[in-house]
Amino acid sequence: MLDWKDIDTVLLDMDGTVLDLHFDNYFWEEFVPARYGEMHGLSAAEASVMLRARYEKVKGTLDWYCLDFWSDSLALDIPRLKEDIRHKIAIRPHAVDFLEQLRASGRELMLVTNAHPQSLALKMQTTAIDRHFHQTVSSHSLLRAKENDGFWHALRERHPFDPARTLLIDDSLPVLRCAQREGIGHLLGVQQPDSQRPALAPSPEFRQISHFTDIMTGLEPR
């Protein structure tokens, strides 16, 4: 699937790639609607319908990932609510083995996430996966989401890398498409970002991996 001799830098998404997306899906689709419904006298189902419409209005923008935006918009303490269910944060199978092999191979390894800095900090405190990366980058520091035009150019200006010799693994098709437009040479999707949901339909645009073991063969020192 990959010729590792052609890759110097590996960029990894966090939620749905290194970490199980179940935490985030449960939080936004079940936990937040339940708390919002309690506050406004709505059933969880009614609150869910209402919130989904609000989510859709900002999806794909930096606000969608911004805890401050949602705390203000919903009058809920979103960071505290995330703390309440931090036990659901989990590393995806074989992720640590993959990260350790990447570091041992001498390749540059960067975590690049749309997560808000507070959410990123919570997940690093819970999992300690940041110790495997040379850099951890929140898109909020670049003032645009990963699927927004110009993001990958801005990332290269801050953390230089050769896009033609870079691999990005991400579970989001809009993110992969943006990275492709901006010259990232090697792109992979993720078949099952949420362990509690069925695998995604195969993408005709990008190859997908089920586990990191799919691409660990041939991962020799650079």
Image (cartoon, rainbow, N blue to C red):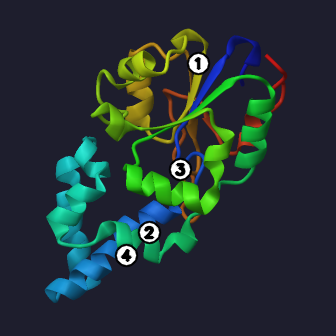
Check disc 4 and give the amino acid type: Phe
- Which residue is located at x 32 percent, y 73 percent? 32
Tell whether label 3 touches label 1 (CB within 8 Å): no
- Which residue is located at x 29 percent, y 81 percent? 35
Q: Which mark is residue 26?
A: 2
Tell whether label 2 touches label 4 (CB within 8 Å): yes
Location of residue 192 with respect to 26 vertically, above or below: above
Report the front residue among 109 and 52: 109
Check disc 2 and give the amino acid type: Tyr
How far apart are the two marked residues, 4 and 2, measured between alpha carbons? 6 Å
What is the quadrant of the C terminus in the image?
top right
Q: Which mark is residue 16?
A: 3
Residue 183 image point, x, y percent: 45, 13
Any part of residue 21 in sight: no
Pick whichever of labels 1 and 3 is earlier in the sequence.
3
Residue 124 image point, x, y percent: 56, 54
Which residue matches tag 1? 166
Q: Quick one: SS at disc 2? A: helix
Pick whichever of labels 3 and 4 is earlier in the sequence.
3
Residue 63 left/right relative to 137: left
Residue 132 left/right relative to 171: right
